[in-house]
Structures are given as C-alpha cells and as structure tokens.
Image (spheres, rainbow, N blue to C red):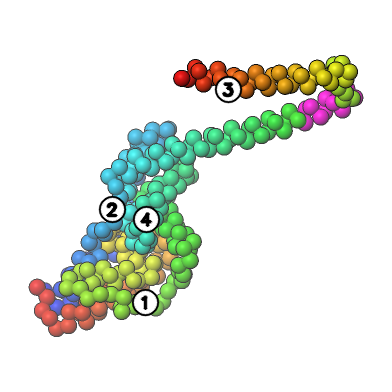
C-alpha cells in the first residue's frame, strides 16, 4: 500500500467512524408517547371547536326564536318584589349570613 | 488506489435507482401494519431507521439539546405522512428526505446561512485545536464543512446510499452529488497529507 492509498484509507476511516451523538435506548418509546400525547391534544382541540360551534349555534337559534315569536323582554314575576324592597334586602343579607356561618364555623368544626 | 477502486465499484453498482425487491416487500408489510394502527410495527420502524436519522441530524445540527427533539419530530412527521408514501423509493430514502428537510429548516430557523450549492469549501482551520489523532482532526474538519457536503459524505459513507438516492434525498442533481463527494474527499485527503507532513503512516 503506497502513501496515497494510506491517506485514502485514513480519510475513509474518519468518514465511516460512528458519531458520538447517540439516541437514548428508549427513543422509540418516547416517540410513541409523543404521538399519543399529540393525538390526545388534537382530540381536545377538536372537542373545543365543537363546543364553540355548539355555543354559536345555540345563540343563533335563540336569536332566531326570539325574532320569530316577537318576544318582548320583561321582568315578569319579579314585578311582585317592587313593593317589598325591605324583604329583598333582608333575604340577601340572611342568605349571605348563612353562607358565612357555614364557611367559618360549621366547615371548620368538620375538618377539625 | 484500493479505496478509489472501491468507490468506483460502488458507483458502478449503484449507478441507477436500484431498489431491492426484498427490502421493498419488508417495507410494504411494515408500512401496511402501521397504517392498520399497529403501534408495535411503528416502534419496529423507528428502531430500524433511528440510526440513519440520528446520523443525519447529528451531522447537520450542532446543538446537542435540539438533536433528540428533531429526531422525534422527524418520526412524528413520518407517522403523519406514511399514508402518502407510494413506494417509489426505499422507505429509508423517504425517511432520510424528511430528516434532511427537517434539519435544514431547523438550521434556517436558527439563522444559519445555507448556500444552495456552495462551490467553494472554506474551512476556518484556526478553530481547530491541535490533536494528536488524525481521525479526530479529520472529524473536526468534517464538522466545519458546509451542510450539503457533510450530508453527502454521511449518506454515502455511513448509510451506503448511492448517488441517485442521495440526489433524491437532498434535491441535488447526481452530478453535483458526485462532485461534492470527490471535492470533499480530496480536501480531506490534502489536509491529512499536510497535517501528517512526511511522517510515515503506520
């Protein structure tokens, strides 16, 4: 083997030498996991779009129905409370007080 | 001389788009199983081609932290597009094409300038530290070559791809592939000669 052939061999050996970069032994499993996650994300995204489409359709149907039946908005049964503002305020305060008692005293005792 | 004969023999053997029928049949069976939803088959496909993809991405992308993710993205793309693969080439060639495009896009995103078909090979040798081992020195030189030269060398020497297949993967004409291979090898040989001087190789 002359010098030139030896240089050729050195170059070929360098070119055929395995690279230091190696993929982890569980690389295939990681890819499969990523594909699975991607599929779940894609499905979630699709569900979200269906939900948005559903809400828009429902609102559209609502507007259509209102215009068709010439619905006029009004307070209806709540006109009864017009003469009883004191009762309404008492009701709100009473319910709020019950909530506060429930959260601060009763639930504390249960957890204790 | 022997190496030259070897290269000539390989070039002659692989002078056309030659695809082994056995390989094609294996690939067809594997692809068909994957398309039927068999994830074990896809795992097998990854195992079979991960070395090829890691060689290509590893050669083109320097950032250690990006390499594995890029390899994963390549196989995700393969999974997505597998239904479009028409067996006009070997499966490995098709996967290599995806890996090459993916790696080049990554380099472009990182603002690394890639000339389409660089004619000149400029190696900033001042970046190379002195090394006692000639193979290490040549490895460092290869790292400094333009991406197209690196990938042609990798596909030819490590993956045993022929000129037509390398052309298909990189989008280069066959003549350019031959030219790049010859010039890159010649440059490395000259550098090796210069590096070793008149020292006798053992």
Snapshot quadrant of residue A68 = top right
| Chain for disc number 1 | B
Secondary structure type for disc 2: loop
Secondary structure type for disc 4: helix
**Residue position marked by numbered label 3 in the rendering:** A103
**Residue position marked by numbered label 2 in the rendering:** A22
**Residue position marked by numbered label 1 in the rendering:** B121
Check residue B100 for magenta coloring.
no
Q: How far apart in space, not on screen, are marks 1 and 4 (Cα)?
A: 28 Å
Q: Is the same chain shared between marks 1 and 3?
A: no
Residue A17, percent across and down? 22, 61
Q: How far apart in space, not on screen, are marks 1 and 3 (Cα)?
A: 76 Å
Q: Is the same chain shared between marks 3 and 4?
A: no
Residue A32, percent across and down? 38, 39
Q: Is there CB contact under 8 Å for labels 4 and 2?
A: no
Over which residues does the magenta segment extend? A60-70
């Amino acid at each position: 083997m002359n010098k030139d052939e030896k240089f050729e061999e050195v170059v070929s050996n360098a070119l055929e030498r395995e690279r230091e970069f190696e993929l982890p032994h569980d690389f295939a499993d990681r890819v499969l996991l990523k594909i699975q996650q991607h599929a779940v994300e894609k499905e979630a995204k699709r569900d979200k779009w269906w939900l948005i489409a559903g809400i828009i359709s429902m609102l559209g149907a609502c507007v259509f129905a209102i215009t068709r039946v010439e619905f006029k908005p009004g307070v209806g049964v709540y006109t009864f409370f017009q003469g009883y503002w004191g009762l309404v305020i008492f009701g709100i305060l009473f319910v709020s007080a019950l909530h506060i008692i429930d959260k601060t005293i009763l639930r504390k005792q249960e957890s204790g | 001389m022997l190496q030259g004969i070897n290269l000539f023999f390989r070039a002659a053997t692989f002078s056309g788009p030659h695809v082994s029928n056995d390989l094609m049949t294996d690939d067809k069976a594997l692809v068909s199983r994957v398309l039927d939803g068999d994830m074990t088959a896809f795992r097998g496909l990854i195992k079979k081609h991960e070395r090829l993809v890691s060689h290509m991405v590893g050669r083109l992308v320097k950032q250690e932290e990006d390499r594995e993710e890029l390899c994963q993205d390549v196989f995700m793309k393969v999974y997505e597009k597998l239904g479009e693969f028409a067996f006009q080439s070997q499966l490995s060639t098709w996967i290599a094409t995806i890996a090459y495009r993916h790696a080049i896009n990554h380099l472009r995103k990182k603002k690394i300038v890639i000339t389409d078909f660089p004619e000149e090979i400029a190696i900033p040798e001042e970046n190379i530290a002195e090394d006692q081992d000639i193979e290490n020195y040549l490895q460092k030189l290869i790292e400094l070559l333009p991406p197209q030269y690196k990938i042609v060398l990798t596909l030819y020497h490590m993956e045993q791809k022929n000129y037509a297949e390398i052309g298909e993967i990189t989008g280069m004409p066959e003549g350019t592939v031959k030219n790049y291979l010859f010039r890159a090898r010649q440059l490395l040989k000259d550098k090796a000669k210069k590096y070793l001087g008149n020292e006798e190789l053992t």
